Amino acid sequence: MLELADAYKRNEPLQIRQIAALHSIPDRYLEQLLATLRRCGLIRSQRGAKGGYLLAREPWQITLLEVMECIEGLETRPTDKTLSTETIERAVVRESWQEACQAAHSVLQRCSLKDLCDRRDTKRQLDIMYYI
């Protein structure tokens, strides 16, 4: 998704083999991931000689939460189902798990693809710098 976010700036579709080569991802696996992301409406495909995949929306509009929910195929929000036979120990563990899920949900909701690209670019700049 970060490669597609970079390509979005240039309005340049990326082909599966390009992304696969950049990240050493098997073509078939990447094909499945991209199909899933397309079904979720996060990316779109473009046919033709210069075809490939593009983000469906601007990078700042796509959150990590959307990507995770799409790829994982599950809702990341905690459920509040309490069993009548639940022990106190299980209740305490469940409540702690719900707090952790809510914290993760909040972080993933606030972070967009653009945020990740910006963080990556900053780290790249720091790697380029050297100190005397």
Image (cartoon, grey):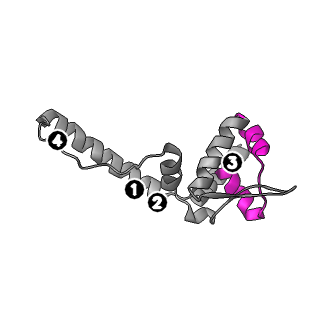
Identity, as a three-letter code, of the amino acid under mark 1: Ser
Q: Quadrant of residue 19?
A: top right
| Magenta region, residue range | 1-26
How busy is the neighbourhood of tag 3: few (under 14 within 10 Å), some, or many (20 plus)? Answer: few
Q: Amino acid at mark 3?
A: Arg
- Residue 116 vs residue 131: left or right? left
Quadrant where the image shows the C terminus: top right
Q: Position of residue 30 (x, y in %)?
A: 67, 40
Residue under pointer 1: 106
Nearer the observer, 124 or 92? 92
Please tell me whether mark 3 or mark 2 is closer to you in this view.
Answer: 2
Q: Determine crowd level at label 4: few under 14, some 14-19, many 20+ residues with C-alpha closer than 10 A.
A: few
Name the residue carrying label 3.
Answer: 124
Q: Position of residue 77 (x, y in %)?
A: 36, 51
| Residue 6 belongs to magenta span | yes
The answer for how far apart the CA atoms under marks 4 and 1 are is 26 Å
